[in-house]
Image (cartoon, rainbow, N blue to C red):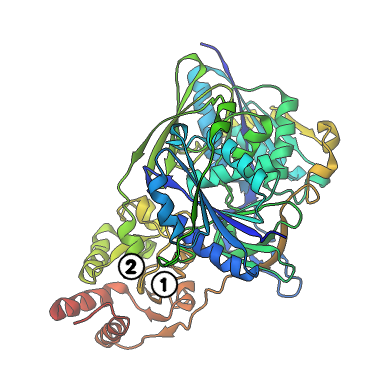
Amino acid sequence: MKERRILVCIKPVPDPEHYDEIRIDPTSKTLVRSGIPAVINPNDKNAIEAALEVREYWGGTVELLSMAPPDAEENLREGLAMGADKAYLLSDRSFAGSDTLATARVLAAGVEKIGSFDLVITGSESADGGTTNVSPQLGEMLGLPHVCNVESIKPQNEGQWQLNVKIEEGYMEVEGPTPMVIGVNHKINIPRYTTVMGIMEAEDKEVVIWSAADLGIDNGKVGLTGSPTQPGGLHEPKLQRAGELLEGEPEVVVDKLIKLLRQAGVLNA
Amino acid sequence: MLPQEVFVVAEQVHGQLTPVSFELLGAAKKLAKEMGGASISCILLGADVSGHGADLASHGADKVYLAEDPRLALYQNEYYALFLTEFFKKRQPEVVLWGASAISGELAATVAARLETGLSAHCSDLHLNEEGLLVQVVPAFGGKVLGDILCPTRRPQMATVKPGIFSSLSKGEEAGEIINEDTSILARCNPLLKTLRVTKEKDRDASLKEAAVVVGGGWGVGSGENWKMLKRLSSLLGGAVGCTRPALDEGWADGEHTMIGTSGITVKPKVYIGVGISGAIHHLVGIKDAEMIISINKDAKAPILSFSDYGVVADFKKVLPGLIERIEELT
């Protein structure tokens, strides 16, 4: 069996458990998210797990790649503690403000510098921005076929992969070649936890950090200037309602509820 | 000067147009009006789509382009992206709208990369600003924040739109023109991906999406036994039961297809009754379009109360049995 070289792209995001705490500052109109820790995008953990499972079956290596600020090294260490072999961090001030297209461009430059892979696996969706753009756009930038929303990966003969893709109406079965880019969904697996042993081993694993200059990337093509989309204003959705309390003994409350159900036209008796 | 053009990429799965295709025409109509009379065009790819042309043409499209080819029978990213990229290069529309579905989302991202233009995802609103740019309102951080996205210089301005946001137009008297497109360009592509088959699953969440009454249960429901109360109440009212992620994880709910919120479905009932739900943003974004929200929570500080029209601060086990009994007597 030929060993596989797999690359997983991960993104640190503010911990989704804390999204209720995110606010917009009323004066500056900017996002207040202080104190919210950065974690590996949950869906990207599925990507790491999927890669580790492929490695367990075929042998080979799992490498991690991220475009993020320098402190993302911590998140990459967590991925290494899960079992990945080596990590690359693409970090440069000029990357700030990159939209999905510019992000895909930076990641593609990273992949090309690292070498060639049998599979590049990503999560399909990020928890913070919530787009599903980067995985297919990375495939495009690399000139590789790509499939996202993948819920199972089965190796076939002759370097083919059989993928089960989740769509709204059901499933789509797709066969793809080596190499390709796969975006997995959150149902493909349950990511493993890190172990003490894994964390200790991760300390000795290598995290390579590259800047825009290391990648030889054109500054005009990345970051906010290289992004076709630009952020406009931020607002909080209007979710507040009157919140009128129905008070009294249970029987009284039931009377009031019956009245409301009738008023809304869902109880006609 | 030619009038500006707003394009809709209609989608079909298993030979059926998806509902969002018609909703996109509704969105296009609104934008075309804001643009001062842009034309609305629609493109549909597939193997046997001629029957759908008239349907799209009578629901708001001035022009319906049909790309009919056996190679387009099932969604195949490379064929679909090649055709649409070349098609939009030729037509240069101002705006292209796509459904925010698994297939259209992937396809839109592919085409955006090839056209090197912007793509916003899962838009919950679209309008023009004073400069005539398309303001694409997208949810971020699970819907806690909404951000405006602009695409100032590149064209087309492209957005995927969440299903259920815009209303489809009623069937019009006047039908648009139907144009059959040449698909010979597909010969340029030697696809590496093979779509073997599409298997259809029953739309299990349809009853929940269409229900006039949704009873939502959260972690506070406490047990599978208590959950039966929610089921009884919803069945008496001809409604359906939805859940939050914690209730799903506990195994009380019917399955992932009943989860409401950011990573689940959006409901728009006449009445939503939340039971034992604290009111995390992940869930709230899925119920915000309910006409009336009633919540029952024993914690007077539960955030859901301020997101409700009516709140009951009580143990639901003391309220629901009486309510169920009363409705049983009445019906």
Secondary element under disc 2, as helix, strand or loop, is strand
Query: Can you see residue B60?
Result: yes
The amino acid at mark 1 is Ala
Q: Position of residue A87 (x, y in %)?
A: 69, 31
Please identify the quarter of the rendering in which residue A77 is found.
top right
Please identify the quarter of the rendering in which residue A101 is found.
top right
Left or right, residue B311 beside residue B225: right
Secondary element under disc 1, as helix, strand or loop, is loop
Q: In terms of depth relative to the viewer, which is nearer, B54 or B296? A: B54
Query: Can you see residue A18?
Result: no
Q: Position of residue B54 (x, y in %)?
A: 41, 54
Residue visible at 66% across and 62% down in the picture = B134
Depicted A130 relative to depicted B165: above or below: above
The amino acid at mark 2 is Val
- Which disc is residue B214 wearing? 2
- Which disc is residue B290 wearing? 1
Farthest top residue?
Answer: A1
Residue visible at 31% across and 70% down in the picture = B213
Binning the other alpha carbons within 10 Å of mark 1 as few (below 14), some (14 to 19) or many (20 upward) gives many
Q: Position of residue A168 (x, y in %)?
A: 41, 47
Binning the other alpha carbons within 10 Å of mark 2 as few (below 14), some (14 to 19) or many (20 upward) gives many
Please identify the quarter of the rendering in which residue B150 is found.
bottom right
